[in-house]
Image (tube, rainbow, N blue to C red):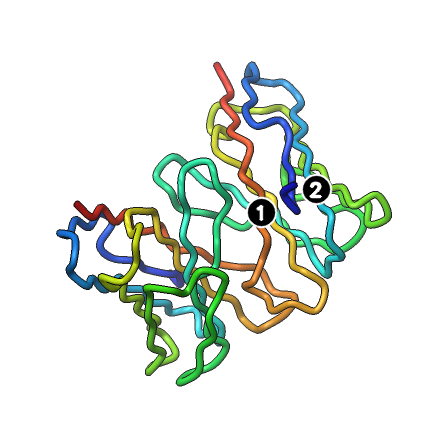
Amino acid sequence: KNEVEQSPQNLTAQEGEFITINCSYSVGISALHWLQQHPGGGIVSLFMLSSGKKKHGRLIATINIQEKHSSLHITASHPRDSAVYICAVQNYGGSQGNLIFGKGTKLSVKP
Amino acid sequence: DGGITQSPKYLFRKEGQNVTLSCEQNLNHDAMYWYRQDPGQGLRLIYYSQIVNDFQKGDIAEGYSVSREKKESFPLTVTSAQKNPTAFYLCASSQGPMWSPLHFGNGTRLTVT
């Protein structure tokens, strides 16, 4: 069983829809990252959180430490949101870069 | 603009040859990392460095080597000992060892035939 599981694996949405991507993990963590990978391959860090909720523009990330679960929400989705979204966790006591990565959720937003 | 530069974007090599991937950052970050990405898999850590002249093996270091002679540079050499070198390689950096976001380069796609 993978230590970080994302769902769904693939997601197709119509422009304007509200989108939720889920991440569940099985290890104790000190932080969770949400990353965005565009078709060219470059990765952008969206959020790093250890509790509660963070919001940036149309993106919202939440985490429930007790349930070992995080969600990434996109409001009013747009075709430019099409990308692979990756959840990664920092093992409790582990070093910053030694993250455990999920396999990613491929999002396609149709106009 | 500050960022991480990886070069080249595409790299082709013959089996048995060593190849070095470049990673340069002008963010003044102390920590740098190399990851490998294969289709259908999550990123995996190859090597990381938290300070100049020091580096540690990640989960899949076999067949790879690194150096950290300068703060801004962290080149990765894929040696002929790496059994499956064809992959997408990503370099990243962060301000410190804990509680800081990662900044990624655009990656190098290496194909070995």
* Subunit that carries the residue with mark 1: A
The structure residue drawn at horizontal position 36% and vertical position 74%, both measured from the top left corner, is B72
Q: Quadrant of residue B54?
A: bottom left
The structure residue drawn at horizontal position 32% and vertical position 47%, both measured from the top left corner, is B87
Secondary structure category for the residue under label 1? strand
Q: Is residue A29 above or below residue A75?
A: below
Residue located beneath label 1 in the image: A46
The structure residue drawn at horizontal position 34% and vertical position 39%, both measured from the top left corner, is A40
Number of numbered labels in the structure image: 2
Q: Is residue A3 left or right of residue B41?
A: right
Q: Residues within 10 Å of mark 2 (few under 14, many from 20)?
A: many
Q: Is residue A74 left or right of residue A106?
A: right
Residue located beneath label 2 in the image: A61
Task: State the image coordinates of residue B66 (x, y, percent, origin top left).
Answer: 34, 72
Amino acid at pointer 1: Leu
Q: Quadrant of residue B97?
A: bottom right
Task: State the image coordinates of residue A27 (x, y, percent, origin top left).
Answer: 73, 53
Q: Earlier in the sequence, mark 1 or mark 2?
A: 1
Whether the residues at callouts 1 and 2 have beta carbons within 8 Å, the answer is yes
Pick the residue in front: A27 or B102: A27
Going by the picture, which residue comes out furthest to the bottom?
B53
Secondary structure category for the residue under label 2? strand
How far separated are the C-alphas under marks 1 and 2? Answer: 9 Å
Task: State the image coordinates of residue A102 (x, y, percent, origin top left).
Answer: 58, 43
The structure residue drawn at horizontal position 43% and vertical position 69%, both measured from the top left corner, is B27
Amino acid at pointer 2: Ala
Q: Are marks 1 and 2 on the same chain?
A: yes
